[in-house]
Image: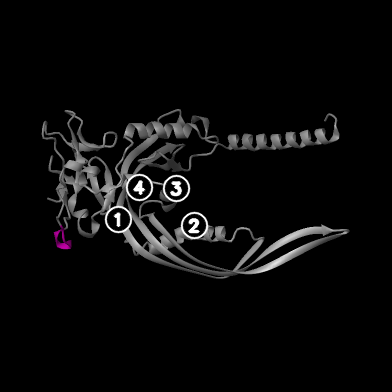
Amino acid sequence: MPVIEYKCPNCGSGMVFDGETGTLTCHSCGRQDNIEQLSDPIANQFFSDEDKTLEYHCNSCGAVIMTEEETSATSCSFCGSAVVLGDRLSGKLAPVMVIPFSIPKEEAMKAFRKWCRNGLLTPKDFMTADRVKNITGLYVPFWLYDLDNHIEVHGRATKIRMYEQGDYRYTETRHFEIYRKIRLNYVKVPIDASEKMNDQLMDKLEPFPYDQLKSFKTQYLAGYIAEKYSYTDNELLPRVKDKIKHYIDSYIGSTVAGYNTVNYSDKQINTRLKNSDYVLLPVWMVYYDYNKKVYTFAMNGQTGKVVGKPPISPNKVIAWFAGIWGVSILSLKTISWLMGGGFW
């Protein structure tokens, strides 16, 4: 069946993944099942394009499940049952691995409020009322790339030495031809594959703890929303190449340290894709309503790192700059007083 629900064998209630315990849990009777010991209902199943379901029905109440085309796990809007859409997680759409949530919803809210209160330039009343419009646990589709880079660099460099002899000051400049042949391997470079998600926001959530990657099972999605990828690994290959360019340039720069000037005449970078894995990574999306405007924040569902742009208080900004300017004036007067040996 394309629609998968997990019912408690003890009481028949719906079971969901509990990030705090890492188990498939029934909140009614307290039963907890180790997911690693459970079989996946869609294991070894393949749904062809002809088998794709156009309309899904909840197994618990029979209601039509309203969902967007990219959604692969959600909940029934009528009875709240957690459902997984199996035909959107098979074949080419089957994730290889998943990093499960480890931060439950309540802890995510506490961490978000603490993060907001630490904002030095946010308005004082930013967190005085409960303005969280919605918080959603979302498994975001990512491609993890393993890349092999062959690099050749040609250029010219100089070393400059200044010295004095008698009444004369000399500048000695030595010129060098430089050549570097480098091989760099990058593993598990993440690129989010969802058209909906803000790329910059997702990039700033890094790093994810890749030692927590587990073989994919649909049980990890129960109780959360999951998206399937919008772009293939080949379609996103130019973006991942652009992402590692900064790291490659930094590494090249480290190999020519010690010169006063370096100018490259030729730089050849040949990047080869060794492997790409389709994975789901945990993100808490927080939508915050303040002064009739919705602010979007994202939290790493494993590390608790929060990213996003909160509102800025103009008065705090002015006070901050005034404080910086005051410290600068104070420092200048202190230096003047010390050099002059008197009072200001």
Q: Which residue is mark 1?
A: 278
Which one is nearer the viewer's eye here, 116 or 33? Answer: 33
Are dots 1 and 4 in contact, CB under 8 Å? Answer: no
Q: Position of residue 257 (x, y in %)?
A: 60, 58
Say what amino acid the circle numbered 2 marks: Tyr
Q: Is residue 4 visible?
A: yes
Q: Which residue is mark 3?
A: 204
Q: Position of residue 144 (x, y in %)?
A: 35, 55
Mark before the other along the chain sequence, 4 or 3: 3
Say what amino acid the circle numbered 3 marks: Lys
How far apart marks 3 and 1 lie (CA) works out to: 20 Å
User: What residue appears at the point 77 percent right and 33 percent down from the top-left corner?
Assistant: 334
Q: Secondary structure at mark 2?
A: helix
Crowding around mark 1 (Cα neighbors within 10 Å: few <14, some 14 to 19, many 20+) is: many
Q: Colour mode?
A: one colour
Q: Which residue is mark 2?
A: 247
How far apart marks 1 and 4 lie (CA) works out to: 13 Å
How far apart marks 2 and 3 lie (CA) works out to: 16 Å
Mark before the other along the chain sequence, 4 or 2: 4
Height in image: 258 above or below 109?
below
Q: Which residue is mark 4?
A: 210
Q: Secondary structure at mark 3?
A: helix
Mark before the other along the chain sequence, 2 or 3: 3
